[in-house]
């Protein structure tokens, strides 16, 4: 079962190779590290978690090489960076969070159907740990790297679309209220129109947490670069 989840932005500006003297991605990197740290702490509250599953999106038809850091898509590189920073903080003398947990990386095509995304989320929410007679229900922590519409204002790399705000309100409200079904039910056609590349991973998160009691907490939200971002935590039980 899903014991907790962290939702973080997919902006490459959080990565080291995109930093400048002003480091515009710094506040979002800090909020994302805090979200993952809290998700790991929440996930361990009632027993040790068994794994971290990363969910993100890749462009349709993209070649994904997940075992080569520089060649992996931005969402996976962001996830690896965040997990590395959290583990380093533990080594530095704080609590070791996720230091020995296996990490499974899953990249969904941006145009994956809602049915495909929800099916994957169901699988992620019902994993098993161990083998044979020792198999048991996994206690999974999700790290979802995704964000909203890329057509909100003149700072975005696309034409403006008046419906972008409606789409972002829909997924942000679902996150704030801890509503898995609303998140799983995001409008696919609207998401495609407003260039919301993170729609499928968000739907997978909603499906994975469906039926669970969700306690949500949003650490940061906004659109500093014309795309709506959020760093949030769902504690599930």
Image (cartoon, helix red, strand yellow):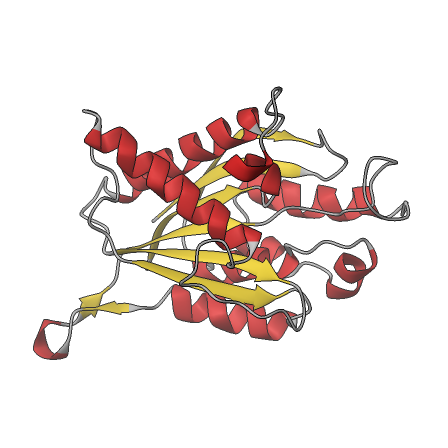
Position of residue 129 in the picture relative to residue 149 (left or right):
left
Examine the rendering and report whether any part of residue 15 can be seen: no
Residue drawn at point x = 59 percent, y = 24 percent = 23
What is the x, y in percent for residue 37? Answer: 35, 35
The answer to which of 162 and 102 lies nearer the viewer is: 102
The answer to which of 203 and 67 lies nearer the viewer is: 67
What is the x, y in percent for residue 101? Answer: 24, 52
Examine the rendering and report whether any part of residue 51 can be seen: yes
Residue drawn at point x = 42 percent, y = 33 percent = 33
What is the x, y in percent for residue 25? Answer: 59, 30
Position of residue 12 in the picture relative to residue 225 (left or right):
left
Residue drawn at point x = 63 percent, y = 46 percent = 147
As drawn, 198 above or below 157: below
What is the x, y in percent for residue 31? Answer: 49, 29
The residue lying furthest to the top in this view is 22
Position of residue 162 in the picture relative to residue 138 (left or right):
right
Residue drawn at point x = 60 percent, y = 74 percent = 115
The answer to which of 212 and 107 lies nearer the viewer is: 107
The answer to which of 185 and 130 lies nearer the viewer is: 130
Q: Which quadrant holds residue 223?
A: top right
Q: Which quadrant holds residue 52?
A: bottom left
The quadrant in which the N terminus is found is bottom left
The residue lying furthest to the left in this view is 133
Picture mark count: 0
As drawn, 211 above or below 229: below
């Amino acid at each position: 079962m899903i014991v907790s989840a962290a939702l973080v932005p997919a902006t490459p500006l959080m990565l080291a190779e995109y930093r400048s003297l002003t480091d515009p991605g710094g506040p979002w990197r800090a909020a994302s590290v805090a979200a993952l740290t809290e998700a790991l702490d929440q996930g361990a509250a009632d027993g040790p978690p068994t794994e971290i599953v990363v969910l993100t999106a890749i462009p349709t038809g993209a070649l994904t090489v997940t075992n080569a850091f520089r060649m992996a898509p931005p969402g996976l590189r962001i996830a690896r960076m965040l997990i590395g920073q959290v583990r380093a903080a533990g080594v530095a003398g704080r609590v070791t969070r996720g230091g020995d947990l296996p990490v499974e990386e899953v990249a969904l095509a941006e145009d994956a159907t809602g049915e495909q995304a929800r099916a994957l989320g169901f699988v992620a929410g019902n994993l098993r740990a161990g083998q044979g007679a020792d198999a048991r229900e996994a206690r999974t922590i999700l790290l979802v790297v995704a964000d909203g519409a890329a057509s909100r204002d003149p700072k975005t790399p696309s034409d403006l679309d008046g419906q972008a705000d409606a789409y972002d309100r829909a997924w942000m409200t679902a996150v704030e209220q801890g509503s898995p079904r609303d998140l799983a039910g995001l409008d696919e056609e609207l998401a495609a129109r407003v260039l919301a590349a993170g729609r499928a991973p968000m739907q997978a998160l909603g499906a994975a947490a469906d039926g669970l009691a969700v306690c949500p907490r949003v650490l940061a939200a906004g659109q500093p670069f014309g795309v709506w971002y959020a760093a949030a935590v769902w504690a599930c039980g």
